[in-house]
Amino acid sequence: MGGGGGGGERGEDSLLSYYCIKFALSAYATLFSLIGLVIFCVGIYAEVERQKHRTLEGLFLAPAVILLLLGLTMFAVSFIGMVGSLRDNRNMLRTFFCVLLAIFLIELLLLLVEIIFERQMNAVFHSSIQDGIRHYYDDLDFKNILDFVQQKFSCCGGDEFRDWDVNPYHSCNSSGPLACGVPYTCCIKQAPGEVMNTLCGYRTLNKERLELVDIIHVRGCIHAVGLWLKDNFEASFGIVCSLLLPQYMSSWLPNSRLRAVENWDLR
């Protein structure tokens, strides 16, 4: 009698544990599949708009393509995890686990590459950003992204503000109101909510950095984003843990179900 009662309690505990893992993994996968679907739809819309106004080629200058790939990957992987967890399908859960593990290892590899080859990676980013700056007014996708980054991270250009000299409109050798200046998104706001003067960066490229510290952001966006990532290491660690959690749950779900069934039979 005692053994049967203990087996029943163990069976109920195992069954509860099994259902907790099952529905937690299902909820996680469903959430990310919906997010992936939204990103994919946004990517489709952005790509349709890009095709209407496209003037440049290249993956770096086509973030809509990146959104499409990211959304499709997120949706496909999460959908496999969702169906696999609901149906307790070992093959689908194994696929889900392996893909997440591969993504996690790729992230770690990229992080190590960035740390070890920081100078070389910065040079690659600098070259790509300079190419984008050169065509700043020809590609609205890149223009919107760079404007957002410059305002969000209080920076200007790639390596430094003088990168804007490669743009034909902002070059000191050109003529016009933009010559030898930077876009207004590089300017420092003097008061919150003020209306920005679009010519606030006028004639700044031929001045020294110390003369501009109260006018524009002189720090490059590569360094600003790098410092932000280092300062927000806790958030990055949290993202990594969120990737590890479903891996742990997907690896334990089949075994948890097996233990639950065995302990339930002991009743």
Image (spheres, rainbow, N blue to C red):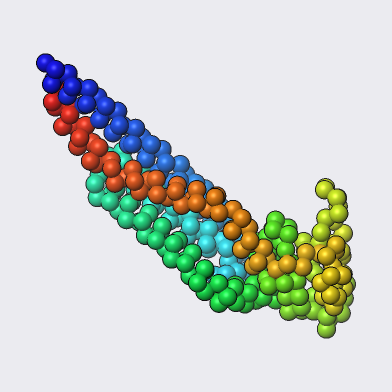
Residue placed at 37% from the left, 40% from the top? 25
User: Is residue 267 left or right of 15 when viewed as pictured?
Assistant: left
Extreme residue toward the front, this view: 2
Residue placed at 28% from the left, 42% from the top? 252
Please provide percent x and percent y for residue 193: 83, 47
Please provide percent x and percent y for residue 61: 60, 69
User: Is residue 188 left or right of 105 when viewed as pictured?
Assistant: right
In the picture, which quadrant includes the N terminus?
top left
Please provide percent x and percent y for residue 160: 72, 72
Q: Residue 148, relative to residue 219: is it above or below?
A: above
Q: Residue 1, relative to residue 221: is it above or below?
A: above
Whether residue 141 can be seen here: no
Q: Which of 27 and 243 is in front in this view?
A: 243
Q: How many marks?
A: 0
The image quarter containing residue 89 is top left
In the picture, which quadrant includes the C terminus?
top left
User: Is residue 223 left or right of 6 when viewed as pictured?
Assistant: right
Q: Residue 265, relative to residue 211: is it above or below?
A: above
Residue placed at 53% from the left, 63% from the top? 65
The image quarter containing residue 143 is bottom right
User: Is residue 196 left or right of 264 when viewed as pictured?
Assistant: right
Extreme residue toward the bottom, this view: 173
Extreme residue toward the top, this view: 1
Please provide percent x and percent y for residue 3: 13, 21
Whether residue 104 can be seen here: yes
Residue placed at 34% from the left, 46% from the top? 248
The image quarter containing residue 58 is bottom right
